[in-house]
Image (cartoon, rainbow, N blue to C red):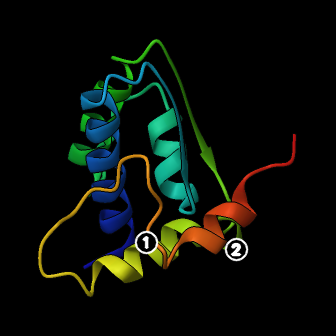
Amino acid sequence: MDSDVVECWAMWKGIILVKDLGIRNIHVEGDSLKVTNAINSPGEDKSVIGGIIESIKAEIALFHKSICSHVQRNGNSVAHALAKLATSLEEPIRWIGDIHPALKNLVTADIPPE
């Protein structure tokens, strides 16, 4: 499966989860410049991933405040590790409030200093 399709699908599912949790502000990051540019573009996306891009735009529009930004792949280490962990799971799971032990060091290192 194309990496842009996978990134779009994961982003869309994450946005829906955040919305379902009642969070009103969202900052979405992705390491595909093609995807983040398409989401930030005001026009309709008619590419192969256009359907998912338009679904993401529709979901993001429901938030009080939203940002979608591009990050380099090395700045996306938590998402990469989470995706790798997900491939080893037999069923989907959610961690609310707790950080999975396999990700704790990465998440801690990703939090900006105050």
- Residue at position x 28%, y 26% in the image: 58
- For the residues labelled 2 and 1, the Cα–Cα distance comes to 14 Å
Q: Secondary structure at mark 2?
A: helix
Residue 63 relative to residue 29: left or right: left
- Residue lying at the far left in this picture: please name it: 91
Residue 110 appears at what percent x and percent y? Answer: 71, 60
Task: Specify the label residue 82 is tagged with.
Answer: 1
Q: Residues within 10 Å of mark 2 (few under 14, many from 20)?
A: few
The one of 13 and 82 positioned closer to us in this rendering:
82
The one of 99 and 44 positioned closer to us in this rendering:
99
Q: Residues within 10 Å of mark 1 (few under 14, many from 20)?
A: some
Q: In what quadrant of the picture does the C terminus appear?
A: top right
Residue 91's place in the image compared with 111, above or below, is below
Q: Amino acid under label 1? A: Leu
- Residue at position x 32%, y 58% in the image: 10
Cβ atoms at labels 2 and 1 below 8 Å apart: no
- Residue at position x 38%, y 65% in the image: 4
Residue 33 appears at what percent x and percent y? Answer: 58, 57
Q: Secondary structure at mark 1?
A: helix
Q: Amino acid under label 2? A: Asn
- Callout in the foreground (2, 1): 1
Task: Specify the label residue 74 is tagged with.
Answer: 2
- Residue lying at the far top in this picture: please name it: 64
Residue 33 relative to residue 57: left or right: right
Residue 38 appears at what percent x and percent y? Answer: 46, 43
The answer to which of marks 2 and 1 sits earlier in the sequence is 2
Q: Quadrant of residue 91?
A: bottom left
